[in-house]
Structures are given as C-alpha cells and as structure tokens.
Image (tube, rainbow, N blue to C red):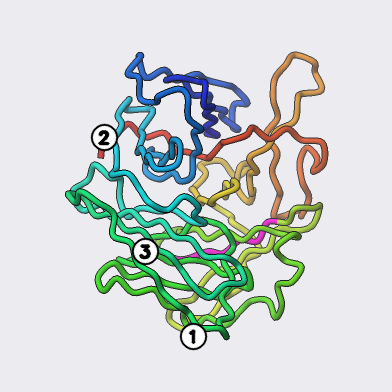
Amino acid sequence: MLMTICSNSGDRYRLFDPMTAKDYDLNCQGKGLFHGDSKLVVFFSKCGWVLITEGTDRVIALNPFARSAFDLPPMGLSVFHGVSFSSPPPHPDSTVLMFSKLRHGSQVEVLVWRAGEDDWTQLRFDLGPDTKFKVTYSNPVFLDGRFYCLGSRGNLAVFDPADSEWRVLDAPECIYDDDDLRTSDSRGHLAEFRGELVAAFVPQHEAPVEMFRLDRSEMAWAKVERLDDAAMFVDNWGAVIVPQPEDSLCNRVYLPKFAWSEDGDGSKVSAYYDLVSRRYYPKFYGLMEPMNSIWIQPKASRA
C-alpha cells in the first residue's frame, strides 16, 4: 500500500491499495506520536515499519498496523541520501544506517545505531578524488549482514557493520559508461528478492524501465526482462519486489502515482509500467503523486 503522511495529520495516515484502488485511513488512537509543529518526512519501509524524521534531529520507527512506535536517539546528520535498517529498531539485533554523500564529492558520512545504544556512531570516509562512485540518492539494501548501496552508473558500495567500513566494490562493473545525463533522466533503486540483488533504473520521462539482477557467483549484472511471478513497487526513496498470486498482476513496476478514473466516481487508478508490453498504464504524463509517500507492506508485528 502507498502510505502518505503529512505534518498536520496527527496520528492519522492515508493508505492507497493499488490492487483494489481503495483509500484507507489508519488512526493510532490519539497516541500523540508527533509534536505537530515540525516537518515530517518518511524515508524507509520494511517489515511493516517505516522510518520517519520529525524536524532536524528526531527519528521515529513506526508500525501503523500494530499501532506501535519507537524513538531512536537524536541524530546529528541534517542531510542524508539513504536510510536503511537490518530489522525493525525494536528488535534486539537491529542496526540502522543513514549516510550522506554529495554526488561529486569524495567523502561519505555515515551514522550507525545499534539496538541498545544511547547514541549514533558517526563515521567519515574519504573515497579519494578519483572515485567513480556517485550515489543514486536511494536507500541501501541489507543482505547477508551488509548494506549495499547503488551507484548511478550501476556499481556498488558496501557498508559492513561488523568492521564499520565503507568501500566501493571492484565488481560488478558499471552498467553505464557515463552518468552525466542519467541523474535527470532516471532514478536508480536497489531491491532484494529471494536472496538476490536487483537494480532498477526508472526514467523520469516516458521510456522503458531497465532492470538487472546481480549474479553473485560471477559478481556481474544480468539483464532482467520480466518478473513472471512478482511485481516491483518504486517510490522516491526505494523499491521492493513482492510475489503476486495472480498472473495479471505480475510483470508490473508500480509507481507512487495514480490517475483519476474516467468513470467520474472519484476513484483512483494506480499507475504502473508493464514489463511485457513495455508501456505505462493508464498513462505516463498528468498523473497525481502524493507528497511524502512510501510503499509499505502491511504487517502487524511489533518487532
């Protein structure tokens, strides 16, 4: 479901289900989670939990389905370009990662919080003036104990919480030779599906979505043409691939956008890219996109 939250929404959240084209409201029963006078931004979603910032230093983990929330320590990084966690922060094994890197700079700033700690650990890495790694401004993916971050040309960087090191991998090789135009033409996202990494480049204009799977035995990208038993959901910060029980729902890349139904009944039609026909439905231009929204999988687990 596409979750939308506003700074003045109090404890209410709007959810849009693209399969049924219905809106739902969730109410956390007046728990007063937010102060109401600071900007809220939703950045990351996993296991039914979302990470939200309020103001400049507050970080909240929220499960709107379980009506459960968890405050992380105040952070000291006002601008960041990717957020992720290994497991929901209430879990005793949780590790939360935030990082910041200017596209044309060589320094990476990293904030790490581990369950039970009172403060964030702040780290700074200098990749050197010749680094070819430029971030996609999208969230990392936690897989097999490490956080993977996608570069705008299709290369990868890794942060390993075990040794607190950030490094750019020599392999896989870049998918694209040059990305001078790619920053405005498409957004790159990384997703995990059935233990594999999948990179997707979603255009900002009416062009095909390009998708690649990482063959970790060869550490090389392989082009993905179809998702025959699954669909991908992308938003401004991340992507998730989920199995679909119906063939008619597979091979779709859902966007965080919708169109109003032509029936005039006020209903919505979710926008998506079809990997088989290589077309956008119901159209590409003129769509509505809720501000401050993110795809979330309903799950009522508290940790």
Label 1–label 2 contact, CB within 8 A: no
Label 1 Cα crowd, 10 Å radius (few <14 / some 14-19 / many 20+): few
Q: Relative to residue 106, is residue 65 depicted above or below? A: above
Q: Which residue is mark 2?
A: 302
Amino acid type at image mark 3: Leu
Label 2 Cα crowd, 10 Å radius (few <14 / some 14-19 / many 20+): many
**Picture disc at residue 143:** 3
Q: Which residues are magenta?
A: 196-202
Label 3 Cα crowd, 10 Å radius (few <14 / some 14-19 / many 20+): some
Q: CA distance from mark 1 to mark 3?
A: 18 Å
Q: Considering only order in the chain, which callout, 3 or 1, is on the residue closer to the N terminus?
A: 3
Query: Residue sitting at 68 percent across and 35 percent down?
Result: 289
Query: Residue sitting at 70 percent across and 63 percent down?
Result: 183
Query: Residue sitting at 63 percent across and 44 percent down?
Result: 254
**Picture disc at residue 170:** 1
Q: Relative to residue 131, is residue 91 depicted above or below? A: above
